[in-house]
Image: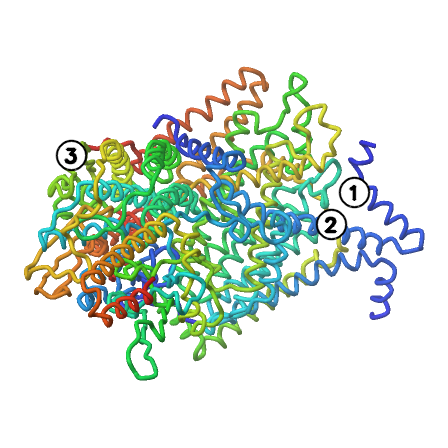
């Protein structure tokens, strides 16, 4: 080292360049001014789960059939489901209670992956802070249910794929049902009605 | 009013650095005995961030352990994912999809880049440089985190790797953005080096501080950059050739003195090597499925047996030792965290140095408390 | 117009005093009022400068670090000091139970007093020295010595280990850096033949070749002495990279650890006012005080030049703070005793040679050699001592 | 006496203020010095001693001896007082507490007696000297330049000798401090 202190001067030059650069280069000033500027979330971004429903009515259009796979697979076990029952006490394929405690949820997306009915999906809403940690951090069914069009608005590619899969599934089932109906045309009225009720449950 | 005497000798002062202290990298605590400014005894205390990770994993399904690995070394979630996936694949003998191997290498090397630049910033912060280097490092790290977010959906808690591959394919345009970032990265490293590596104050603070001989490093179980700074040529990417690392050309830098400056510089040099690996991997990544279709994720039940899968994490050897009993839960789930084991020589390194050096030595080991305490 | 701007502050003062005098106010009361007005103005200017700097420093630091900095309170975040002030005043004033509460209480007061007192002898503009003292420079350093007592009191009175360590560091550091600081200041006194700041400023008047200002900083010895003074000023005002007494990565906040609320604000204020005072002294001694840098720029009032130069020096201090890591205590002391002190002696010798060699080209060469050779020798010896070297690394394929 | 005082007050308030600038610091000096002797807490004693140094400096300045006053502040407050507190900080704490033992038994009484005897003797000599009967001379103004010239002219030998002595002391201190290093 011939000139002691030259390294310090070099460092000062770097900081001076950054000081001046922060006024002219956008690349050097990457901070988002949050409430005014919103982050542009990538499609894959995820926050907490929500439940998708088809059509306009959340209750009837609900895709969830209360199979409880997500409840079982959830790593921190933040999902709580009670299956609905009709007056006779017979189980209906619909959850009566579906709660997600997002103070426990770790946004891992495993519930989405394991759901066989394309019902649970990840939301992108990140403004969830509240003064009430028990009320607003436990999402119940009305808060969780969001329409398919909302799903399309946040994850367009994924939602389109899902719809395609559901459509293909439906077509396959319809074809199978039609074949079955054609095969045993007259005698089995009961099985036809049962299969149509299944279709109603999952249009 | 007393002059705060220590229990051992009236001339020394006992200071408890941490768990709430500006530069203990989280909730780490050191009980330090000082003679003036010189450290005569140092007792690390950890466990403040213990989360029972291994036991939680043993109570959950194999898949459910994956998101928890993100939280080990939360600076580099993707390498943690890989280490666990690797261990499970070894246990169950699962083939990994070709494209997924490339994605794993790319994400792991990106993780290494952002870990090493963040390390440079943190060490400078420990030296009192008011976070300037840290902010530059975070400026670049942010871009890498954005890439992670668009790929995996989360910036830090990625939960991306799966048994036999990865969870989802690269989004369109991702590789181009990555290529641009990787091409621009050496320029940023040059800027960091101009700011830091010639600085006389930094050199005086780092050189000759807490040297570690190769022997001591090996006997102490060191791994990763700390071991290589001591002059040992040991990189698991070369030793195990896990994944597809044997297809890439890269060099393993190693230090000569093993002091804080070597530990610092090794990271800079490794970051440059990672850029080279990334360039090669991006150029030749093949098309194809990202996950082995035969591999089961939900309800995964590996045959009874045991396996130890390890990778060269940015901080050192990260290993998962798994025992399966044929059920859907691991029978034993054990993590070998590099941060904890690299920390074991802390007292030996610190005794005899000044208190200001303790922070730098701690910083130069590069620990993350999430991994130390698990 | 120009001359009226130049002496505007004094004219206003005289007009006001004349007005009072016409009402039959006795002369001695007028003298007191005049003094109070001057004191009030100086404190007002420096405290508002402090307020402005506390936000500008954060903004500049932020910009260096590629951030925005405070920009929420008011336009461009300019009301941030008001918000900070309200916060500081309304915060609870904690005193540790085992603290030596008298010392703990008095420390911020003792810190503030010298910071304000030293402002008295700085020439703010042409004929604008609040207290024209023969031994002005001596006064500056004598009063400034009070800061050390305050730091010690704060450190001891808090009864906290970090505080005591911080106080010990602070005292060791201040004693060590006071020596080169004073010697480098004395060099200018030697050349200008006076200890009075205004005489030193006027000794730097005039322009060589009609446009090069004859500031001391533009001579080899003056540059060296000025650099030493600057470095020591950083150390004396506990600023980075010499902020060991409050080095947050080691000692949390050093002697300030146990202070909160308004006492902390007082410390903060005193440190900034002290920084401005020492910047003002640096400008006075080496940067030609209130003199304009170019002849035709004389139209701008002298006090504006002074303020501008002080702000520039303060800016460089912030810039340095944003760039450099902190020194270690042994490096710090070795640097003061083994490098700065000999270098300040070299500057001393160089200045003497410059003076006796007739201040011509020969003087330039001679004085440059006298400071340059020790710099190269001492500097390299010093860096080698701390084994500062470039290393080569091995790579294995 | 009191009317005289009031008269001077009204006649020349500035002069009065000037006088009080001497009297007040002098009082502070005496009180602080006395308190420093009595204090049991060593740090408090050292700080009070510092206060008395400051007061002494102000007395000098108020009496017109600016240069001496500033040097008093610079050297005693800036250096001597700091060396005192620094050495207190470096002493072993058990020694700090042991100093109390001195204050028991006859020791305090003996100390006070010695002090008063010395004070009485000093005052006696001062008041019996012819200087005390002289009228007070006008305050001498000593410009710094004159002091400098005197130091570098008439007293230059003394100055150099002092300088060499201090340098020798400094080198000696450095040698002693270096001893325990290998």
Residue at the extreme front? A186
Of mark 1 and mark 2, the one earlier in the sequence is 1
Chain bearing tag 3 is: B
Q: Are marks 1 and 2 in contact (CB under 8 Å)?
A: yes
Label 1 SS = helix
Residue at the extreme bottom? A88
Chain bearing tag 2 is: C
Q: Residue under circle 1?
A: C9
Q: Residue under circle 2?
A: C41
Q: Residue under circle 3?
A: B247
**Residue C132, can we see it?**
yes
Label 3 SS = helix
Q: Dot 1: within a 10 Å radius of its alpha carbon, few (fewer than 14), some, or many (20 or more) residues?
A: some
Picture residue at 34% right of the left edge, 35% below the top: B176
Quarter of the figure with the N terminus of chain D: bottom right
The residue closer to the viewer here, B212 or B153, is: B153
Q: Are marks 3 and 1 in contact (CB under 8 Å)?
A: no
Q: Where is residue B39 drawn, in percent x and y?
A: 29, 56
């Amino acid at each position: 080292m011939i000139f002691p202190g030259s390294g310090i001067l070099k460092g000062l030059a770097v900081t001076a360049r950054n000081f001046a650069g922060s006024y002219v280069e956008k690349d050097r000033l990457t901070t988002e001014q949050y409430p005014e500027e919103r982050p542009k979330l990538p499609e894959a971004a995820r926050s907490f789960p929500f439940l998708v429903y088809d059509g306009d009515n959340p209750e009837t259009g609900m895709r969830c059939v209360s199979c409880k796979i997500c409840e079982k697979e959830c790593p921190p076990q933040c999902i709580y489901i009670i299956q609905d029952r009709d007056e006779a006490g017979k189980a209906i394929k619909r959850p009566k209670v579906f709660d997600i405690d997002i103070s426990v949820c770790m946004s891992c997306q495993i519930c989405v992956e394991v759901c066989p009915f394309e019902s649970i999906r990840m939301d992108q809403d990140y403004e969830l802070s509240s003064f009430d940690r028990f009320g607003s951090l436990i999402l119940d069914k009305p808060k969780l249910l969001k329409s398919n069009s909302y799903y399309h608005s946040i994850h367009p590619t994924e939602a389109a794929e899902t719809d395609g899969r559901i459509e293909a599934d439906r077509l396959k089932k319809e074809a199978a049902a039609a074949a079955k109906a054609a095969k045993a045309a007259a005698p089995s009225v009961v099985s036809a009605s049962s299969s149509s009720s299944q279709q109603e449950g999952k249009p | 009013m007393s002059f705060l005497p220590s229990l051992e000798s009236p001339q020394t002062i006992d200071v408890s650095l941490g768990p709430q202290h500006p530069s203990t990298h989280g909730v780490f605590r050191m009980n330090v005995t000082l003679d003036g400014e010189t450290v005569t005894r140092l007792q690390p205390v950890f466990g403040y961030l213990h989360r029972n990770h291994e036991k939680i994993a043993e109570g959950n399904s194999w898949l459910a352990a994956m998101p928890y690995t993100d939280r080990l070394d939360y600076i580099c979630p993707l390498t943690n994912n890989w280490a666990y996936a690797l261990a499970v694949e070894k246990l169950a003998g699962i083939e990994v999809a070709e494209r997924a191997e490339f994605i794993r290498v790319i994400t792991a090397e990106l993780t290494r880049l952002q870990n090493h630049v963040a390390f440079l910033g943190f060490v400078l912060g420990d030296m009192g440089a008011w976070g300037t280097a840290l902010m530059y490092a975070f400026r670049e790290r942010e871009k890498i985190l954005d890439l992670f977010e668009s790929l995996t959906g989360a910036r830090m808690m990625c939960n991306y790797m799966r048994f036999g591959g990865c969870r989802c394919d690269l989004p369109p345009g991702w590789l181009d953005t990555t290529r641009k970032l990787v091409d621009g990265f050496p320029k940023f490293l040059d800027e960091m080096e101009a700011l830091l590596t010639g600085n006389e104050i930094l050199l005086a603070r780092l050189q000759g501080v807490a040297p570690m001989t190769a022997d001591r490093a090996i006997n102490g179980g060191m791994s990763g950059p700390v071991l290589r700074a001591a002059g040992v040529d040991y990189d698991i990417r070369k030793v195990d050739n896990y994944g597809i690392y044997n297809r890439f050309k890269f060099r393993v830098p190693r230090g000569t003195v093993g002091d804080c400056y070597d530990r610092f510089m090794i990271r800079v040099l490794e970051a440059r090597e990672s850029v080279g690996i990334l360039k090669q991997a991006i150029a030749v990544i093949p098309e194809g499925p990202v996950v082995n279709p035969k591999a089961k994720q939900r309800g995964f039940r590996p045959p009874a047996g045991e396996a130890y899968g390890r990778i060269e994490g940015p901080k050192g050897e990260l290993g998962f030792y798994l025992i399966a009993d044929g059920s859907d839960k691991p029978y034993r789930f054990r993590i070998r965290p590099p941060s904890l084991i690299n920390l074991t020589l802390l007292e030996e390194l610190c005794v005899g140095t000044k208190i200001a050096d303790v922070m730098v030595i701690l910083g130069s080991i590069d620990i993350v408390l999430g991994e130390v305490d698990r | 117009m120009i001359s009226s701007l130049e002496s505007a502050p004094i004219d206003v003062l005289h007009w006001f005093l004349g007005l009072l005098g016409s009402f039959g106010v006795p002369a001695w009361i007028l003298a007191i009022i005049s003094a109070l007005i001057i004191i009030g103005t100086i404190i007002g200017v420096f405290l508002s400068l402090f307020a402005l700097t506390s936000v500008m420093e954060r903004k500049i630091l932020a910009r260096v670090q590629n951030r925005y900095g405070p920009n929420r309170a008011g336009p461009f975040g300019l009301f941030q000091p008001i918000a900070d002030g309200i916060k500081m005043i309304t915060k609870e004033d904690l005193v540790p139970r085992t603290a030596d509460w008298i010392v703990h209480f008095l420390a911020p007061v003792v810190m503030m007093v010298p910071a304000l007192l030293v402002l008295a002898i700085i020439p703010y503009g042409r004929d604008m020295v609040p207290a024209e003292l023969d031994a002005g420079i001596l006064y500056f350093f004598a009063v400034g010595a009070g800061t050390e007592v305050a730091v010690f009191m704060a450190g001891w009175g808090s009864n906290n280990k970090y505080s005591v360590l911080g106080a010990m560091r602070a005292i060791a550091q201040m004693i060590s850096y006071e020596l080169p600081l004073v010697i480098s200041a004395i060099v200018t006194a030697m050349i200008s033949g006076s200890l009075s700041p205004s005489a030193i400023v006027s000794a730097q008047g005039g322009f060589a070749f009609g446009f090069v200002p004859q500031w001391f900083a533009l001579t080899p010895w003056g540059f060296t002495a000025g650099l030493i003074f600057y470095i020591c000023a950083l150390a004396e005002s506990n600023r980075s990279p010499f902020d060991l007494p409050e080095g947050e990565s080691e000692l949390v906040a050093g002697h300030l650890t146990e202070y909160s609320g308004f006492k902390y604000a007082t410390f903060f204020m005193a440190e900034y006012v002290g920084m401005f005072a020492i910047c003002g002294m640096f400008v006075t001694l080496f940067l030609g005080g209130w003199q304009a840098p170019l002849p035709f720029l004389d139209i701008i009032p002298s006090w504006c030049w002074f303020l501008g130069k002080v702000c520039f020096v303060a800016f460089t201090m912030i810039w340095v703070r944003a760039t450099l890591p902190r020194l270690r205590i042994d490096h710090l002391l070795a640097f003061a005793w083994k490098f700065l002190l000999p270098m300040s002696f070299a500057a001393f010798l160089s200045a003497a040679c410059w003076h006796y060699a007739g201040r011509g080209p020969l003087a330039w060469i001679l004085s440059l050699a006298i400071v340059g050779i020790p710099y190269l020798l001492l500097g390299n010896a010093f860096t080698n001592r701390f084994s500062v070297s470039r290393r080569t690394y091995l790579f294995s394929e | 006496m009191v009317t005289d005082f009031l008269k001077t007050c009204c006649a020349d308030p500035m002069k009065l203020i000037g006088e009080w600038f001497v009297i007040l610091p002098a009082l502070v000096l005496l009180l602080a010095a006395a308190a420093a002797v009595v204090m049991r807490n060593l740090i408090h004693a050292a700080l009070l001693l510092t206060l008395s140094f400051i007061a002494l400096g102000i007395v000098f300045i108020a009496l017109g001896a600016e240069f001496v006053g500033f040097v008093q502040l610079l050297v005693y407050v800036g250096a001597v007082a700091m060396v005192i507190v620094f050495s207190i900080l470096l002493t072993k704490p058990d020694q700090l507490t042991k100093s109390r033992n001195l204050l028991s038994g006859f020791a305090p009484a003996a100390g006070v007696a010695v002090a008063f005897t010395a004070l009485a003797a000093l005052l006696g000599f001062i008041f019996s000297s012819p200087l005390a009967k002289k009228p007070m001379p006008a305050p001498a103004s000593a410009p710094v330049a004159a002091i400098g010239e005197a130091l570098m002219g008439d007293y230059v030998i003394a100055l150099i000798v002092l300088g060499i002595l201090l340098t020798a002391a400094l080198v000696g201190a450095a040698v002693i401090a270096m001893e325990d290093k290998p």
